[in-house]
Image (spheres, grey):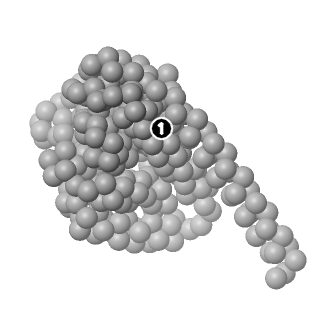
Amino acid sequence: MLAGGLSGWAVHSAFQLDLIRLVVPRVPPGGFLAALQATLCIGVLAGALTALTGEAIYWARGWRDRPLTRLLIGGAALLVLALLIGGLATPAAAFGPGGAAIIWAETTSPAPHRLLALALLRAAATTAAAVLAGGCGGVFVPFLAIGDLCGRVFAAPFGIAPDLAGAAGAAAGIAGGYRLPFTAMAMVLGVGGPEGAQFTSMATVLVAALSGLVTARAANALSSRVRGVWRGRVGSGE
């Protein structure tokens, strides 16, 4: 473990990588109503999107086909998604676990609909499509990035600071997609910030955990029903 950590640090320092940065909230929400709106909307969106992404990963891993077929289909999907992300944001935002996408969102202040589109495209490109092509890797950091982008969608509409929206969304992504609400809460406390911002992020984690659970169960039920119908048609020779 120590050797792995030192090796990772050495590579990070040698190539001056900036793969992901946890956003520290600096400004608390302006009032109770703004905090409540942000908590509900960010928690629901980030929790649901990361949960759906997780379900898509399980589906992609379970797809049985020739490796070459998976590579061609997944690779073509990744190429299309990379082009779309590059046109929507920057080419750098299409690669890596999501740090470049967050930097783009921080420095350009894009419109909410562009942030939402980027979150959806990143969810498809960095997880489901990559796994479909035969790739492997962790999804902890990509879920942080997807959640961060989902949070920033509601920064301008509700008048809350983008850093607070991003921090709450990142924690919500871990709670909803990874099903680790206590880890997300520990991350919120570790990142720090004003008490009002921490309380908002904590509440967002709870909403995201519930949203992710409901979304995952609904997706599982729908997937089971579709598979049952498909098997029934194949068995009857239709």
- Residue 115, compared with residue 227, is above or below; it is above
How far from the left and from the top, in percent, is residue 205? 47, 30
The residue shown at (64%, 52%) is: 219
Is 70 situated left or right of 116 in this image? right
Q: Is residue 158 left or right of residue 184?
A: left
Quadrant of the snapshot with the C terminus: bottom right
Viewer-proximal residue, 30 or 235? Answer: 30
Query: Where 193 sits versus 235, above or below?
Result: above
Residue 187 is at least partly visible in this image: no
Q: Secondary structure at mark 1?
A: helix
The residue located at (25%, 64%) in the rendering is 88
Q: Is residue 141 left or right of residue 103?
A: right
- For this rendering, which residue is in front, 154 or 85? 154
Q: Residue at x 36, y 35 (%)?
A: 34
Indicate whether 34 appears above or below 119. above
| Amino acid type assigned to the residue bearing label 1 in the image | Leu
- Where residue 4 sits, quadrant-wise, is top left
Q: Residue at x 33, y 21 (%)?
A: 196
Residue 178 drawn at (x, y percent): 50, 36
Residue on which disc 1 sits: 40
Name the spot of residue 85 as percent of width and height, x first: 29, 63
